[in-house]
Amino acid sequence: MAAGQAVIGVSGATGQLGEIIVRTLRAQYPDIPVVALVRDLAKGAPLAALGAELRHFDYDEPGTLAPALAGIDKLLLISGNAVGERERQHRAVIEAAKEAGVGLIAYTSVLRASETSLPIAAEHKATEAILKEVGVPHVLLRHGWYCENYLFRIQAAVDHGTLPTCAGDGLISAAPRADFAQAAVAILTSREDQAGKVYELAGSTSFTFADLAAEATRLSGRPVTCVQLSKPAFEAALVEIGTPPFVAALIAKSDMGACDGGLFDESRTLEKLIGRPTTPMSEVMARALRP
Ligand SMILES: NC(=O)c1ccc[n+]([C@@H]2O[C@H](COP(=O)([O-])OP(=O)(O)OC[C@H]3O[C@@H](n4cnc5c(N)ncnc54)[C@H](OP(=O)(O)O)[C@@H]3O)[C@@H](O)[C@H]2O)c1
């Protein structure tokens, strides 16, 4: 590894966000040593082919985490996806980072974690508290929603002609994963000390569900109508079409969060970090929608 360069570790490196971050780091900063922390070494092979060092790293194997973090200066802790298990998992990683002498943890939290009513925020809030309690220097990357979260619903809306929601006219400032990834790269490679900083990250532009229906109509050439339902009716409708109840509850809570303004942000912090406006939802939809 190159002398004098801070070594960057990325957990969840084989996930959708982590993979873009490792690829971007390797492409834009080939001199910076990158350790891809993965729970499945075989899945990480494409990252090794790009020059990242692969290390086994499973949040559920606490005793193995500190040795795996040896020599890492900055750790991007990408929040896990096992909802309900994450407080315990993240604590294990943070304590291991402290033991291994990691100099900075960058944690992917949720937009306005301290006061939000968004679903699944409790584990992010708890993780932020653990970072303080354990006392590792850290920076918070508080993410708004990814544009990609909505694509399966928009495709279904094009197929069926209706886009149900309980979000009302709540504005959503989403950005694609690639833009959040670029922001993480900017923070991890910054020469400025990042410890103690909190970034509220969201899209430069915002949309409502009515906007999504109109854009889906325009792009597909098929009429798509936005249908506003009460939260219980929306959740029941999702279950009726085969959505697992746990997922239906999460989607309904997320739309209620939008209704309450929890997904709206006009700080343009993400835009400032990446040096350009975020990619608009319409562009993400145009790339993803089937004719
Ligand atoms: N803001 C938003 O809109 C939004 C949307 C979705 C998710 N998220 C959050 O942001 C995170 C990153 O998003 P994403 O789209 O990249 O999610 P993802 O594709 O599901 O990736 C999650 C990553 O976490 C890894 N992981 C899960 N459990 C682990 C464990 N026990 N030990 C080590 N690694 C573990 C997964 O490993 P494998 O590759 O081995 O499966 C995967 O690499 C998610 O995990 C979730 O917390 C935010």
Image: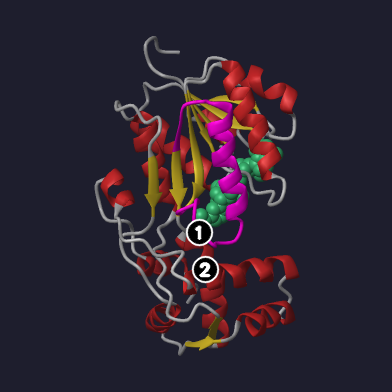
User: Which of the 4 image quarters holds residue 183?
Assistant: top left
- The circle on residue 79 is none
**Is 64 on the left or on the right of 146, as rendered?**
right
Q: Which amino acid lies under the numbered mark 2 shown in the image of this protein?
A: Gly
Q: Could you say which is closer to the camera, residue 149 or residue 258?
A: 258
Residue at disc 2, secondary structure: helix
Residue at disc 1, secondary structure: loop
* Tally of marks: 2
Q: Residue at x 74, y 70 (%)?
A: 245
Indicate yes or no: mark 2 CB to ligand 1 under 8 Å.
no
141 versus 120 height, above or below: above
Tag 1 and tag 2, C-beta contact below 8 Å: yes
User: Which of the 4 image quarters holds residue 33?
Assistant: top left
212 versus 134 height, above or below: below
Judging by the rendered image, the residue that carries numbered circle 1 is 116
**Is 283 on the left or on the right of 177, as rendered?**
left
- The circle on residue 257 is 2
Stretch in magenta: 111-139
Q: Position of residue 83 (x, y in %)?
A: 68, 52
Q: Earlier in the sequence, mark 1 or mark 2?
A: 1
Give the CA separation, mark 1 to mark 2.
Answer: 8 Å
Q: Residue at x 71, y 72 (%)?
A: 243
Q: Position of residue 108 (x, y in %)?
A: 50, 43
Q: Residue at x 67, y 71 (%)?
A: 248
Q: Could you say which is closer to the camera, residue 6 or residue 106?
A: 106
| Disc 2 residue crowd, few under 14, some 14–19, many 20+, Cα 10 Å | many
Q: Residue at x 71, y 22 (%)?
A: 64
